[in-house]
Image (cartoon, helix red, strand yellow):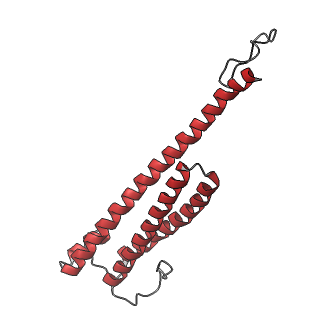
Amino acid sequence: MNSSQPVDSQPTQPWRERVASYVDDIAEVAETIDLILDETRIRTKGLRPNEVDASTTQLVAAISELEKMVERRESLLRAEDAPPKGLSLSEKLLSSRKIDDARLARRCGEVAEMIAMTHQRATALFICQYHLSEFQREVLQRLTGATAPQTYDRSGQKPKPSSGLFNEAA
């Protein structure tokens, strides 16, 4: 990835080439996140929590790389050699009315859609993992009788029989 490119340095490449490099780099980061999400989903389905934790660490690193790309995009938008019209990279590219710039603008849109899909996948995986963890907690509560009424009533006088599959088996 070329995200280590200094943001404040004078550009050595034309603006369009720097944008193309940025788009390639951000697409690579998005693909990496997609792969990590695939691995995490498989590990979640296989109930391998230690491996899910490792995937989460990888995901955090990839997302921080994606966050660095925001600064790079802002630098490209404010660059002196950038087209003056437009608020986004796509708009600036389209304002030049060049076919190569239009193709790059389309690629920007494709990468934006890929990132949006990745965001949806990550959200769905998080919700799935949350519900799985809640399901496990609920099963354990039922087995131990934690969801049953308290053993003592409010006056503290007589014990009530405890319930739960573990207690009944004992």
Q: Residue at x 77, y 14 (%)?
A: 152
Question: Left of 47 or right of it: where is 80?
Answer: left
The count of marks equals 0
Residue 82 x/y as whole percent: 31, 80
Left or right? Give the position of 155 relative to 125: right
Viewer-proximal residue among 22 and 129: 129
Question: Can the viewer see residue 128 in this picture?
Answer: yes
Residue 34 against residue 16 in the figure, above or below: above
Q: Which quadrant of the figure contains the C terminus?
A: top right
User: Most extreme residue toward the bottom, as rendered?
Assistant: 12
Say whether residue 145 is visible. Answer: no
Q: Residue at x 54, y 61 (%)?
A: 59
Q: Position of residue 114 (x, y in %)?
A: 36, 62
Taking the view exactly as shown, the residue that stands out farthest to the right is: 157
Residue shown at 34% from the left, 64% from the top: 112
At 56% from the left edge and 66% from the top edge, which residue is drawn?
61
Q: Position of residue 165 (x, y in %)?
A: 68, 24
Residue 52: quarter of image:
bottom right
Q: Which sits in the foreground, 13 or 154?
A: 154
Tell me if residue 145 comes above or below residue 98 in the rendering: above
Q: Position of residue 33 (x, y in %)?
A: 47, 63
Q: Is residue 96 above or below residue 86?
A: below
Q: Residue furthest front?
A: 169
